[in-house]
Amino acid sequence: MKKDTYILGIESSCDETSMSIVKNGRDVISLVISSQIDIHKLYGGVVPEIASRNHVLALNSVFEETLAKAKMTMDDIDAIAVTYGAGLLGALIVGVNFAKGLAFAFGKPLVKVNHIEGHIAANYISHKSLEPPFACLIVSGGHTALVKMEDYTTRRLYGSTTDDAVGEAFDKVARELGLEYPGGPNIQREAEKGRANKRFVVKPHEKFKDFNFSYSGLKTAVINYLHNAKQRGEQICVPDICASFQAEAVEQLVQKSMHLLETEELNQIVISGGVSANKFLRTEMDKAALKIGARVYYPDLILCTDNAAMIASAGYFNFKAQKGIVDPTELKAEAQVAL
Ligand code: KG4
Ligand code: ZN
C-alpha cells in the first residue's frame, strides 16, 4: 500500500503566522492561523517591524497547537515546507529560521515554497480532483498575474501588473475612504449597498492588448476624485464609490482571464490569493466563463488569504517532484521572488 505523505507547512510572509499539516497535498489534518490584523489595523496597514516581532511571539504556540490538533508528533512528519519569499523580509526570516531549526533538529527534509505557488495550491485542497494544466489568475495584496500551470511544479507567466497589485489598490482606496485595514472585504461590503455609477479611468483599459494589468491609474483617479470632492465641500456616497471602483478593478481581471483561456484553448481557470475571496469578482468571472464554456475554481474562503495549508500543499508537490529541497543551513528568505 502506498504510504501517505505528511507535510508541515510554515507561513510568515506578512501578517499571519500559520502552520498546517497536510496529507498527500490535498487533505488538511490541522491548520492554525494566528492573525495580527487587529494589531496592524491601528496603523492602517502592516508595519513590517511589528509583524516580525509578533511572528517571533506566536511561532512556538502555533507549532504546538498544529501538532496537538493533528494528534501527531514530528516523527509523523515527512518533510517541512516553508515560504521563503516573496514577502516582508523580516517576517519571512522568522518563519524560515524556525523551519531551518526544525529540519535540523528533527532531521527532516526542508522544501522551500514560493508564496504564490502556495496560493495556487490552495485550490488543490478545495478541489480534490483539480489537476493541471489550467490557467491561473493570482490576485493578492502583492501580486496580480496570469499564469498557466503546465504541471504541478511548472508555471508559465503570461502577464502581471505593471504597477500596483489589485489588493493593494483595494487597501489604498479603502484607507482614503476611512475604511479599516484590510480594505478589500470592507470595500466589498460597502459596494453591496451602492451602485457602480461612475467610471474613474476615463479611457477604459485597452481590451485584449496583452495580459498585463495596471492599477495605479485607477487608484490615483479615485483618490483625486475624493480630494476634489472634499475641497469643494461635496458629499460623497461611499457605497457608490466602492461599487464603481470594484467594478472597474474586476473588469480588467475578468477580461484578461477570458482572453488567456481563449488564446491558450484552456477550459479551466483557478483564482488564487486574497482578492479571490471577493464576491463580485466571483460572480463576474463565473458569468464570463459560462459564456465560453470554461470552469472557474476558487479556494474555500479560509484558504484565500494567507495560510500554511497552501504552503504544505505546494511543498508536497515539489517534494514529490524532488524540487525545492534545500540544505537547512543554506536557505535564505527573499523579499522578491520571480513568479
Ligand atoms: O493573499 P493575501 O492574504 O496576502 C498577500 O499575499 O498579499 O491577500 C491580501 C489582500 C489584501 O489586499 C486584502 O484587502 C485582499 O486580499 N482581500 C480582498 C478581499 N479579502 C481580502 N479584496 C477584495 N475583496 C475581498 N473580499
Ligand atoms: Zn498571500
Image (cartoon, grey):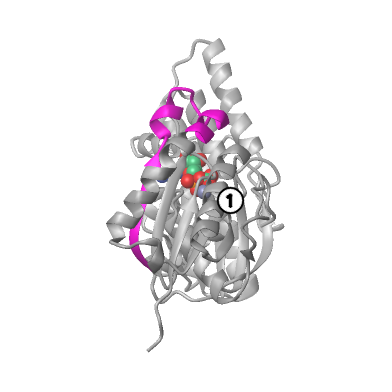
Number of callouts = 1
The residue positioned 57% from the left and 70% from the top of the image is 318
| Residue 317 horizontal side relative to residue 335, left or right | left
| Residue 20 horizontal side relative to residue 49, left or right | left
Q: Position of residue 286 (x, y in %)?
A: 43, 62
In this orientation, which residue lies closer to the viewer: 271 or 21? 21
* One can see residue 318 in this view: yes
The amino acid type, in three-letter code, at marker 1 is Gln
Q: Residues within 10 Å of mark 1 (few under 14, many from 20)?
A: many
Q: Position of residue 16 (x, y in %)?
A: 45, 42
Quadrant in the rendering for residue 71: bottom left
Query: Farthest residue in the front direction?
Result: 105
Q: Position of residue 70 (x, y in %)?
A: 30, 61
Residue placed under numbered mark 1 in the picture: 252
The answer to whether residue 230 is above or below residue 8 is above
Quadrant in the rendering for residue 93: top right
Under circle 1, the secondary element is: helix
Q: Is mark 1 within 8 Å of ligand 1?
A: no
Please check the rendered image and state whether residue 174 is part of the magenta-colored stretch, yes or no.
no
Q: Position of residue 330 (x, y in %)?
A: 68, 55
Locate the N terminus and report the quarter of the image it occupies.
Answer: bottom left
The residue positioned 62% from the left and 55% from the top of the image is 145
In this orientation, which residue lies closer to the viewer: 313 or 288? 313
Magenta stretch bounds: 27-53
| Residue 102 horizontal side relative to residue 86, left or right | left
| Residue 74 horizontal side relative to residue 257, left or right | left
* One can see residue 285 in this view: no
In this orientation, which residue lies closer to the viewer: 247 or 303? 303
Locate the C terminus and report the quarter of the image it occupies.
Answer: bottom right
